[in-house]
Image (cartoon, rainbow, N blue to C red):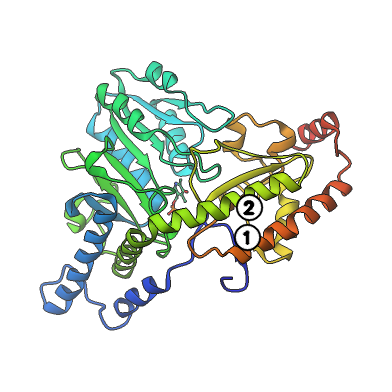
Amino acid sequence: MQGNCIYLDNNATTRVAPEVVETMLPYMTDFYGNPSSMHSFGGQVGKAVKTGREQVAALLGADDSEIVFTSCGTEGDNAAIRAALQAQPDKRHIITTSVEHAAILNVCKQLESQGYHVTYLSVNRQGQLDLDELDAALTGDTALVTTMYANNESGVIFPIEEIGMRTKEKGAIFHVDAVQAVGKIPLNMKSSTIDMLTLSGHKLHAPKGIGALYLRRGVRFRPLLIGGHQERGRRGGTENVPGIIGLGKAAELEMLYLEQGSKKQKKLRDKLEQILIATIPECEVNGHPTERLPNTTNIGFKYIEGEAILFHLDKHGICASSGSACTSGSLEPSHVLRAMGLPYTILHGSIRFSLSRYTTDTEIDTVIEVMPGIIERLRALSPFKNDDAAWLQEQTLAHR
Ligand SMILES: *Cc1c(COP(=O)(O)O)cnc(C)c1O
């Protein structure tokens, strides 16, 4: 139990690890120097920033010089796309996928309005890409291929190195939004085709407001934020010192816990998923059964609204999500589940549970205990139970 809730929304944000808070604290009190200063008071802080950089680089199997600290995942995504286009001004084509985070999709949409041509690769019912579609889309005019490593809503993992090989053959830059992958699956940039990779602190038990962009040595880069010479001239602005130190500590903890933590989360996730599917009628898992993050399950319950399920879970102190945090609040179904072609009856009744290394067996047991009752009560109230046609008509009217 964290705070006073059962927190199963770790793909939206995570608890800051206590060790991370402890490591950061002195840099918000006594050690407030500017790491760029010439005096030793600032120099001390500069050393701590260097350690943070080494820790993040180690988690990625990268060199220290290849890490640029940013303010968040969104900034990393924006900076990577802009840099790739500026480095190849004669190329006008971008390839991405239809299930990316808004930090990629909305940048691509804006670029389309500025004359770029964007291909949005489709996914199948299990949330997977078709690499033939990628092959067909790649041309000599393709400046950038940008895909996520793992999807925040379905947890589906893309075949990154196969995408990278095809991208490199055509001479395009390969950017990966790995915000959901870092700390959940092992990564090694030394044996990778990735040119640029985005990560975000608050998805891996570091605080909000800090992220990093991995930039392979030799890949041309132009900063998004132009200013001082911080980050070797690749990102202006005085460093978020406590954030960097916290992200470094979080990276170090992931090196320790990743393997064992993933196994534990997968076991709990599988238990939750299997028992819910077995005890609740008319529900199914959205997303590929195995090519998936160990901490994520997205389950569709027919004939009810996901928001209603969330409301009842919340009354039991359980935090989960329907759609991504950025789009919930509106009743529009998630663009990811829509791209997967889920039928309307499931689209609106899908819930994501995302675990962390802090999730306990008891917490999962509580969810298993309360879910069947919640679904049964909501279905009893639903005028559409067992009537696909009526449900479809209602949804079509509601979302017109
Ligand atoms: C959360 C998330 C982002 C955005 O990261 P912020 O640090 O919140 O800006 C980008 N991509 C994916 C896949 C995410 O899950």
Asked if ligand 1 lies within 8 A of label 1, the reply is: no
Res 354 seen here: no
Which quadrant of the rendered structure holds the C terminus? Answer: top right
Give above or below for 48 relative to 13.
Answer: below
* Quadrant hosting residue 115: top left
Position above or below: 353 against 112: below
- In the picture, measured across the screen, residue 59 lies left or right of residue 18, that is left
Give the residue displayed 83% in from the left and 28% down from the top.
389
Kind of element beneath mark 1: helix
Mark 2 Cα shell of 10 Å, populated few (<14), some (14-19), many (≥20)? some
**For the residue marked with disc 1, what is the amino acid?**
Ile
Residue 379 vertical placement versus 9 (above, below): above
According to the picture, the residue beneath numbered tag 1 turns out to be 364
Residue 280: x %, y % from top left = 76, 46
Instruction: Determine if the C-beta at disc 2 is less than 8 A from ligand 1.
Output: no
The image shows residue 142 at horizontal and vertical percentages of 32, 23
Residue at image point 16% right, 54% down: 232
Image coordinates for residue 145, horizontal then vertical, percent:
35, 30
Residue at 42% x, 69% y is 17
Q: Residue 7: horizontal and vertical position, in percent?
A: 58, 63
Which residue in the structure is indicated by mark 2? 272
- In the image, 383 versus 72, the foreground residue is 383
